[in-house]
Amino acid sequence: MKDTIWFVLPGTDELVSPYSIYDNSKRIEAAQKFSATMVTTVVGEDLDGFLRGNNDILILTKVSYGEQPLVDRIHFYDKEIPTGDPIRSMFADNIFTTDDYSGNDKLRIELNVLEIDTDSEERKMLTSAFQSLSASAGAVFPAILPYAFAASTAAEVMERLISTLEKDQYVIKFPLSLYPGELKRGMAPLQEGDYVVFSEPRDPIRFRLQPSGLLTLAGETAKVSYSVFNVSGQTYTSPSFILSQKIATLLTQINSGNSNSTKGTLNFLESTIQQYSNYQKLQRYLELKSKANPSEKETQLLGDIEKIKELKPFLPTT
């Protein structure tokens, strides 16, 4: 049987169906932390043809968690990647992370690998802008670009790149939703392991996923186009990435709304504003608590903050 998406269980190398649960499956459970991370991408075909011989490659995902909107993430951009060269150790390898899984929400990941055409000056700007953003935040979120590179040429070039994606040539374009709860036909369970996405349907029988993250076919290097991403019960991301992820989700809600839920945009905005307000109050509380002699009004404010139910778990007990 051929398919575009296959799954590799932890500690194994065989490609199996992602739509099944196995004896050694590790499901992602409620209240558990987990992350999805890019591992490897290989472009096996020479998409640029005779004149150039190498490919300008962009790797981008669109991710939705629960009823949140699809949020774009750029994981890699570089020029003139030799055909067949593996793309690994990406600056921006994080796809999604949470330190408290709800146990009820699905995770939708749309993986896009594209060969793009840019002129030489645009290449320089894109490469510089990408490396700058990914180094500081662990990811590049297009929704944040107008604010991160305000009034700069790099921002204009990056935005133009994103807006013209449909005109470029897709090596891989594949959406996958990972579901919680009981196994249901046609619904891939959210579980730990590696997901292998091919550019076209493949029979998995002779493919093996090596510890390097590369595929072999009958013992030889697989000369096909594919991407590998991993779902793990651990998180390896920095606080700055988690913050950037939340900001990008918020900006996407504001700019584009949310097709996943008619109430999604308003509810998400209300929740985010409330959380930010509580965070500010917590900071203010700690600031006032450290004062040796707070004023009467400051003491009153401390008492008011202590009454906020949502903040009680974070307030000092003494």
Image (spheres, rainbow, N blue to C red):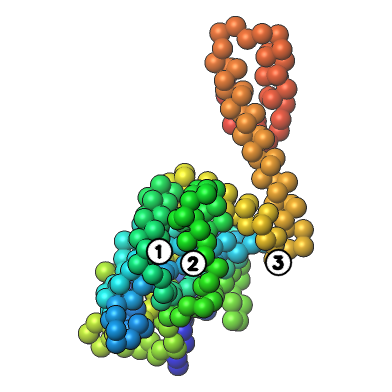
Q: Secondary structure at mark 2?
A: helix
Image-quadrant location for residue 209: bottom left
Residue 74 appears anywhere in the view: yes
Q: Position of residue 98 (x, y in %)?
A: 52, 53
Q: Position of residue 272 (x, y in %)?
A: 66, 45
Considering every residue shown, the one lying at the far top of the view is 293
Considering every residue shown, the one lying at the far bottom of the view is 1
Q: Which mark is residue 259?
A: 3
Label 3: few (<14), some (14–19) or many (≥20) C-alpha neighbours in 10 Å = some
- Residue hosting label 2: 161
- Residue hosting label 1: 122
Dot in front, 2 or 3: 2
Q: Which mark is residue 92?
A: none
* Amino acid at dot 2: Leu
Query: How far apart, in angstroms, are the residues tagged by discs 1 and 2?
Result: 9 Å
Q: Are marks 2 and 3 in contact (CB under 8 Å)?
A: no
